């Protein structure tokens, strides 16, 4: 039995007042932060005017000799110059092999491409790790609507490996992912009118960003070393599968996405150029390079496809891209790179020399095409 009801009443009164004050402060904070427009309310593949540094262990990652500085401009593109100063704008879409997070800003193939084309060119790198043609269709639709990019006449898309591997990992997710789910992967930011009302609050977004930044700080340093080393160790103990599943459904979906991109390009009178996915995969790969292969093709790395099987599947997806391009008179670049550490530090990610070789081949192709 409470012997001091007055004291208890005072405690509840203080709690109620504290709650009301806190609520008012949160409302005022939300109003103030909303007015500051901290979070972009548009389609961006990267957070505008932001960046981070990716720590690189050069002893573990072959062919990369410095930490990677990743910076985004006001369009959310990873670029090395101001688009406002360029008379020719080129947009590049792709997955991690376009984003090139392991390479510092000036050493990515889009940056090297810009340098080779000359001062009048700007190459906006809108690559996002993990993205496939599913996402490029959406990026083409929304990124090119930006007023700053309404004079873009050339779009380069490097794709294929995330379509192929994505289909292996989950055929249903690759073929049937809901539109809203695809948008959230294709973009770092999208208009938030689809969100529940409480998730539209700036305070909620700040809390979410803080959590993400904390996780990134503790996890990203080990991504290219510890995570990869764990996968390599797991692969040595896992079953190696030589036979690929039926790829027909995945190939048909891939073709539909390619046609959708071609249709958008033609409607907007944009010169579309695809870049075939280059990889280290090949039959009878030397053991020192085989040891660098970490792609599984199975959920949770429960098993691994052989390198020869991965090579075969990638060739099939690349051939489908070539066929559709030939049928529609669309340009493509079939990269010819050494299937060694002269090009890659793992299955298909470029090291410094690989990015240089890639930019050389694309620039030589473009210098001819852009004159036509």
Image (cartoon, rainbow, N blue to C red):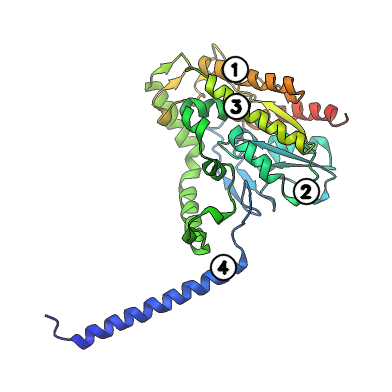
Q: Which mark is residue 149?
A: none
Q: Which residue is mark 1?
A: 316
Q: Nearer the viewer, mark 2 or mark 1?
A: 1
Farthest residue, direction right:
371
Callout 1 environment at 10 Å: few (<14), some (14 to 19), or many (20+)?
some
Q: Which image quarter holds the N terminus?
A: bottom left
Callout 2 environment at 10 Å: few (<14), some (14 to 19), or many (20+)?
many
> How far is mark 3 from mark 2, CA to CA?
31 Å
| Element class at badge 1 | helix
Q: Which image quarter holds the C terminus?
A: top right
- Rendering coords of residue 317 (x, y %): 60, 21
Instruction: Name the N-terminal-most of marks 2 and 4.
Output: 4
Callout 3 environment at 10 Å: few (<14), some (14 to 19), or many (20+)?
many
Q: Which residue is mark 2?
A: 83
Instruction: Name the N-terminal-most of marks 3 and 2.
Output: 2
Q: Which residue is mark 3?
A: 254
120 lies left or right of 320: right
Callout 4 environment at 10 Å: few (<14), some (14 to 19), or many (20+)?
some
Q: Which mark is residue 33?
A: 4
> How far is mark 4 from mark 3, CA to CA?
42 Å
- Rendering coords of residue 359 (x, y %): 73, 31
Q: Nearer the viewer, mark 4 or mark 3?
A: 3
Instruction: Name the N-terminal-most of marks 2 and 1.
Output: 2
């Amino acid at each position: 039995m409470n012997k001091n009801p007055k004291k208890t009443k005072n405690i509840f009164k203080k709690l109620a007042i504290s709650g009301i004050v806190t609520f008012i402060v949160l409302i005022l904070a939300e109003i103030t932060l909303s007015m500051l427009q901290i979070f972009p309310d548009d389609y961006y593949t990267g957070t505008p005017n932001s960046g981070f540094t990716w720590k690189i262990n050069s002893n573990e990652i072959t062919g990369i000799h410095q930490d990677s500085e990743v910076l985004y401009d006001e369009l959310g593109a990873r670029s090395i110059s101001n688009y406002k100063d360029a008379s020719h704008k080129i947009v590049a879409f792709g997955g991690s092999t376009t984003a090139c997070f392991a390479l510092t800003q000036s050493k990515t193939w889009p940056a090297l491409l810009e340098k080779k084309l000359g001062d009048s060119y700007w190459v906006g790198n809108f690559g996002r790790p993990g993205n496939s043609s599913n996402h490029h269709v959406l990026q083409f639709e929304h990124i090119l609507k930006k007023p700053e990019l309404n004079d873009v006449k050339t779009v380069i898309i490097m794709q294929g490996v995330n379509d192929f591997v994505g289909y292996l990992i989950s055929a249903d997710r690759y073929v049937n992912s809901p539109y809203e789910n695809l948008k959230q992967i294709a973009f770092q930011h999208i208009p938030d009118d689809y969100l529940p009302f409480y998730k539209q609050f700036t305070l909620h977004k700040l809390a979410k960003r803080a959590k993400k930044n904390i996780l990134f700080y503790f996890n990203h340093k080990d991504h290219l070393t510890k995570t990869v080393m764990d996968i390599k160790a797991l692969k040595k103990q896992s079953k190696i599968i030589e036979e690929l599943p039926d790829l027909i459904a995945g190939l048909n979906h891939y073709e539909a996405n390619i046609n959708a991109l071609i249709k958008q390009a033609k409607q907007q009178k944009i010169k579309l150029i695809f870049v075939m996915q280059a990889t280290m995969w090949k039959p009878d790969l030397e053991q020192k390079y085989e040891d660098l292969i970490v792609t599984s093709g199975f959920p949770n790395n429960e098993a691994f496809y052989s390198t020869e099987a991965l090579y075969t599947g990638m060739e099939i997806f690349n051939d489908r891209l070539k066929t559709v391009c030939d049928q529609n008179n669309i340009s493509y670049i079939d990269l010819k790179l050494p299937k060694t550490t002269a090009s890659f530090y793992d299955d298909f990610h470029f090291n410094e020399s690989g990015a240089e070789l890639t930019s050389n081949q694309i620039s030589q192709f473009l210098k001819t095409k852009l004159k036509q």
